[in-house]
Image (cartoon, rainbow, N blue to C red):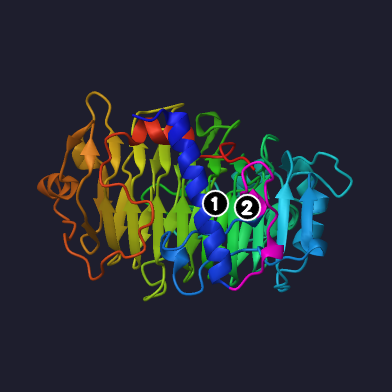
Amino acid sequence: MASPSHRRSLRTRRTVLVSTAAVAAAGLGAAVFAMNANAGAVDLAHQVLPAKDGWAASGTGTTGGAQADSAHVFTVSTRAQLVKALGSATNSTAKIIQIKGTIDANTNDAGKKLTCADYTAGTGYSLAAYLKAYDPATYGRSKLPSGTQEKARAAAQAAQAKNIVFKVPANTTLVGVPGTNAGITGGSLQAKSVDNVIIRNLTFSATEDCFPQWDPTDGSTGNWNSAYDSVTLRGATHVWADHNTFTDAPHLDSANPKYYGREYQIHDGALDITNGSDLVTVERNQFTNHDKTMLIGSSDTDSVGKLRVSIHHNVWKGIVQRAPLARIGQIHIYNNYFDTTTINGYAPLYTVNSRAKAQVVAEFNAWKLPSGGKAAKLLSGDGTGSVAGTGNLVNGTATDLVAVYNAANSKKLKTTVNWKPALTAGLQTTAKNLATELAGTAGAGVLTK
């Protein structure tokens, strides 16, 4: 049997060859990619999504900035350089942005570190005043906060958003330079109403909202809600998110205080796919140390006929929920590894949630269930969503997760779907070795030129 390193080498070569073929098939000239002299491989920044690799390969496929000319290939290492390289969100000129090292989004244009206090300047906001103004004991629980302090909170939040939200244009590749611990800390990539985006080999950490909003009507006891996902797709199409790592670190949820008896939650989603986004492939990422990890569909009335997402060969470890929470769309979940052990205080509630008539096919995935854990809690739903598929393992044993879930819950998951996955490149028909394989092949820092 081949060693793990040898198998990774083979997979890398296969990806390169298919990527080269996809470039040629898309009519892109040889000039759009540089060749590695030793291996004859397309360099990482110019690779495109392989053929049939999930929903993002549908139609025109996903090539990101592969057609960029030399004037639109950038290497950036600061927030200001990243903003300049991205340019206008409406400029669809093909571009490649290579991120070298870790970019701190909470810095000004001169590179000075910014704190939450900097964003409150001129707004009149203070947490102490906010807590006094909207204490449920005096303000009540029937309406959202309004008035002076809520306006001040919103203004401070807008100031932070202006600094940390990076708007990604169409036809863009964002890729981490190998060997540099490439990533973005404290920031939020936003692809809104754009087509053809690639995001690879990046670590997204510490995406934090300095100014969560109190909502006394959220649930029976209210909740603090934050605003920023590490990566958010809103009405975006043909997106490939590959070999990235998502984490709350270094500030974990266990360090969050409580106000009004509820956790002051400063983290939102890791990778959310909403507002009619479509044709997305999420591949070989690591999701760790996070609560609300991946949302597909912003509401139960999001866009019918869209939200088609493939999620494969990812590691989910130390996450609480939404792996993913899927609404409406056709979602293919295959060859993922879910470790449902409580890690760093992140205690899993469930992994896959199918609701609002979502059509989920989950096959050949592996779950690690700790001692005392219940397989019936690995899935969730609202009684309208479907989960089909086979070949799933729990602690190495073949398990019909839907049957186990339905036996323990009144709101049953449906067992049939209205579609059959066809874009299944890389599908492995056994989940037996996923834990070992993905430990060395998923997440940022694995890919090399």
Position of the N terminus, as image quadrant, is top left
Label at residue 42: 2
Would you say 64 lies left or right of 363 here? right
In this picture, is 101 found above or below 230? above
Q: Is residue 222 magenta?
A: no
Check disc 1 and report its element: helix, strand or loop: helix
Return the x and y of residue 64 as percentages of the image width and height: 62, 63
Q: Is residue 37 magenta?
A: yes
Q: Start and end of the magenta stretch?
A: 27-45
Return the x and y of residue 110 as percentages of the image width and height: 89, 46
The secondary structure making up most of the magenta span is loop
Would you say 367 lies left or right of 426 here? left
Q: Is residue 217 visible?
A: no
Position of the C terminus, as image quadrant, is top right
Please give the name of the residue rendered at 74% of the width and 58% of the height, measured from the top-left corner: 162
Q: Residues within 10 Å of mark 1 (few under 14, many from 20)?
A: many
Would you say 25 lies left or right of 345 here? right
Kindly identify which residue carries mark 1.
Answer: 16
Q: Earlier in the sequence, mark 1 or mark 2?
A: 1
Confirm or deny contact between disc 1 and disc 2 (CB under 8 A): yes
* Closer to the camera in the image, 78 or 177: 177
Q: Quadrant of residue 77 in the image?
A: top right
Return the x and y of residue 62 as percentages of the image width and height: 54, 65
